[in-house]
């Protein structure tokens, strides 16, 4: 059995309402705005250590006296190490004020053991964005210091580290804001196997640190489909409006279905037995006297129709009873001179009365 028109509309509205709720749920879960960072100023700090190794003339290096990082420098040949330290500060916006406060320490240590600090450059203040310092480290003096500490502590190591550590404090003002940073690049000289001659290596020669100033801003999240775009906030409002429209439509259809009067028994009979009922234009004329048999119900008349293989005829007549107009629905089956009939009387409602009320005054004869 197919769905009635009202039920089909009701089902479609339920599906559309459920879909619109799902769409609203999707948009209400998405963020309305997204935070992003706006850079107003970029700055950069560069630190570079440039060591030069001074050695004694030797057959190995063809009497050369200078070696550079990357070349093996044996301690027995090394006299001293000259180190140039260069620092530079760059900013995308011209500073309105700039102060550079710095000092440099030398640290001789054993990893996980003792540590000896030397001041290479005492505290200095400069208004220049670029500085350079030069140092000379005599290897024999460093070896003597190591020997003294070993004799005092009784600890001997295969590697010793001499670190050059600048302590840099930058304070600068720009139109984008204040920059205040502490920076400590570290160059390390590694002295290996001092007792058996050994050699030296370098680590941490070049450093770069970048930073920026800025602020956070919120931006509306955009949603697009098939070339059409809108903000998520707008789609939230649209989805709520669609839900409201479908909800109102659904309530209206339900109200119509609830308030609609039920079909009369006559309509139910025609709906159920419509394929067997033939509308009559009047009582047929017969020469032979007709025998009338009244059946109790329309179901019994249907059985007669099935057994006799005759259609059910339907005839409407009108009569008056105590001033009230009565409509008679006569359902009958003709089988030769026998007439099987079932009569239902229905009062005819006056204009403006009983409109939309259920059919309660039917009389079965």
Image (cartoon, rainbow, N blue to C red):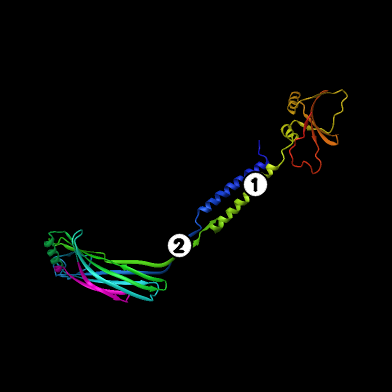
**Is 251 in the magenta?**
no
- The percent coordinates of residue 355 (x first, y second) are 76, 42
Which image quarter: residue 92? bottom left
> Which residue lies under the disc numbered 1?
251
Q: Residue at x 64, y 44 (%)?
A: 10
**Is 134 in the magenta?**
yes
Residue farthest front in this picture:
322
> Which residue lies under the disc numbered 2?
36
Which quarter of the image is occupied by the N terminus?
top right
- The percent coordinates of residue 214 (x first, y second) are 42, 67
Which quarter of the image is occupied by the C terminus?
top right
* Discs 2/1, front: 1
Q: Nearer the viewer, residue 74 or 147?
A: 147
- The percent coordinates of residue 329 (x first, y second) are 80, 32
Q: Are marks 2 and 1 in contact (CB under 8 Å)?
A: no
SS class, disc 2: strand
Region of the chain picked out in magenta, as a range? 117-141
Marks 2 and 1, how far apart in space? 45 Å
Relative height, residue 68 to residue 31 (above, below)? below
Q: Residue at x 74, y 34 (%)?
A: 265
Relative height, residue 32 to residue 69 (above, below)? above
Which image quarter: residue 205? bottom left
SS class, disc 1: helix
Residue farthest left in this picture:
151
The secondary structure that most of the magenta stretch takes on is: strand
Relative height, residue 70 to residue 22 (above, below)? below
Q: Nearer the viewer, residue 319 or 202?
A: 319
């Amino acid at each position: 059995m197919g769905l009635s028109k009202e039920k089909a509309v009701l089902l479609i509205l339920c599906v559309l309402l459920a879909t619109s709720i799902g769409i609203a749920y999707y948009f209400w879960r998405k963020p309305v705005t997204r935070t992003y960072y706006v850079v107003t100023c970029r700055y950069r700090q560069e630190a570079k250590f440039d060591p030069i190794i001074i050695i004694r003339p030797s057959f190995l290096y063809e009497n050369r006296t200078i070696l550079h990082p990357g070349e093996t420098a044996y301690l027995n040949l090394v006299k001293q190490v000259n180190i140039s330290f260069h620092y530079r500060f760059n900013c995308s916006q011209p500073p309105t004020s700039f102060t550079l406060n710095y000092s440099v320490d030398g640290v001789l240590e054993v990893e996980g053991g003792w540590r000896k600090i030397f001041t290479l450059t005492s505290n200095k203040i400069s208004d220049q964005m670029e500085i350079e310092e030069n140092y000379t480290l005599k290897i024999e003096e460093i070896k003597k210091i190591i020997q003294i500490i070993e004799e005092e502590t009784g600890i001997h190591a295969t590697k010793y580290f001499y670190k050059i550590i600048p302590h840099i404090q930058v304070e600068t003002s720009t139109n984008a804001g204040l920059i205040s940073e502490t920076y400590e690049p570290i160059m390390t000289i590694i002295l290996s196997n001092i007792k058996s001659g050994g050699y030296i290596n370098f680590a941490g020669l070049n450093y770069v640190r970048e930073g920026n100033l800025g602020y956070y801003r919120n931006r509306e999240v955009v949603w697009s489909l098939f070339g059409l775009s809108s903000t998520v906030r707008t789609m939230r409002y649209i989805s709520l409006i669609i839900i409201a429209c479908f909800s109102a439509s659904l309530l209206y259809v339900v109200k119509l279905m609830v308030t609609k009067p039920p079909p009369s028994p006559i309509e139910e009979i025609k709906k159920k037995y419509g394929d067997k009922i033939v509308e009559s234009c009047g009582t047929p004329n017969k020469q032979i006297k007709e025998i009338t048999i009244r059946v109790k119900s329309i179901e019994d008349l249907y059985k007669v129709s099935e057994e006799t293989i005759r259609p059910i005829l339907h005839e409407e007549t009108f009569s008056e009873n105590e001033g009230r107009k009565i409509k008679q629905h006569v359902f009958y089956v003709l089988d030769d001179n026998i007439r099987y009939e079932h009569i239902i009387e229905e009062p005819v409602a006056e204009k403006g009365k009983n409109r939309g009320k259920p059919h309660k005054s039917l009389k079965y004869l």
